[in-house]
Image: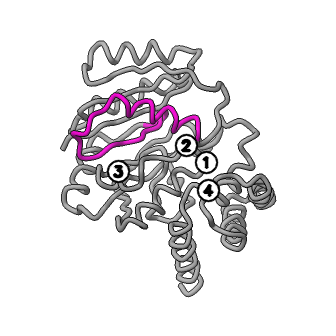
Amino acid sequence: MDYYVIIPAHNEETFIGLTLDSIVKQTLLPKKVIVVNDNSTDGTEKIIDEFASTHPFITKLNTASSTLHMPGSKVINAFKKGTELTDDNYAFIVKLDADIILPHNYFEKIAYIFKERPQIGISGGFIYEQDNEDKWVLNHPMDKNHIRGAIKAYSKSCYKAIGGLKSAMGWDTVDELLAQYHGFELYTDDTLRVKHLRPTGNAYDPKAKLLQGKAMYTMRYGFWITLIASLKMAIKNKKLQALSDNMYGYFEAEKEKTPFLVTEKEGRFIRKLRWRNIKQKIMA
């Protein structure tokens, strides 16, 4: 199965070589890897060039966006730049972070999942990060069927149905909600253990703290689902400040009439899906 891998990269000289090395060692190689060098000021470009010189399927694309490392818009804008170098002849497309190490059979198993179960629209493995004792431990605070944004693979039919990825905070939630809206399933494979070399959010600009609540507004969650989701997030992460930050961000987005990421019909589906999941967890 042909597939594309697109890697947005901003100042990733410490990790990008390890990520690319894990890709060139895959048992099923990609049709093309497009590394989008987004305004890097370190040695990222040199490392990409070194891999591209010995592996013809690796391509570098230079672009210049904001120097701020904001979640959502920056990384997806870079991803979209990368898609401009693809054609329509692929089975699935992958958005990959530049600070991970994949098991060697990662994409072979992803291809098998999509081939054997056409109803699956988004698939991936699980993220592991090093703890204080340098042990690799699972870091998956979301529901088990959620695929982390660092390692998302989309079947072509699903990717086209959802209209690609949204350039906004919450892109890696709204994609899964829209996939389900269009009748696709989500699938995570717990045998695919991916090493994440930099803990999530460590490089984000401090201005990003209100964006989660804004994202919930733009996905048409409504007040009560936003409140419940924010409380759950604050408890899981042991950061009560997240609750007030999220709600403040939600009300700011409402006051500013921030454009929604989904239609009214999609919003009704999303709220119904969220309430059903909440009730199932309460009853469990």
Q: Which mark is residue 260?
A: 4
Q: State the residue position of label 3.
A: 160
User: Dot 3: within a 10 Å radius of its alpha carbon, few (fewer than 14), some, or many (20 or more) residues?
Assistant: few
> As rendered, which of 125 and 39 lies closer to the eye?
39
Does residue 15 appear in the picture of this structure? yes
Q: Who's the residue at 73% across and 55% down the image?
A: 257
What stretch of residues is rendered in magenta? 73-100
Q: List x then y, in percent, for residue 30.
A: 25, 35
Mark 4 or mark 2: whose residue is earlier in sequence: 2
Name the residue type under label 4.
Phe
Name the residue type under label 3.
Lys
Is 242 placed left or right of 4 in the picture?
right
The picture quadrant where one finds residue 90 is: top left
**Magenta-drawn stretch contains 85:** yes
Name the residue type under label 1.
Met
Q: List x then y, in percent, for residue 42.
A: 57, 15
Q: List x then y, in percent, for residue 206.
A: 75, 39
Q: State the residue position of label 1.
A: 169
Q: Which mark is residue 167?
A: 2
Q: Which mark is residue 141?
A: none
Does residue 240 appear in the picture of this structure? no
User: Dot 2: within a 10 Å radius of its alpha carbon, few (fewer than 14), some, or many (20 or more) residues?
Assistant: some
Q: Who's the residue at 23% across and 46% down the image?
A: 91
Is 216 placed left or right of 156 in the picture?
right
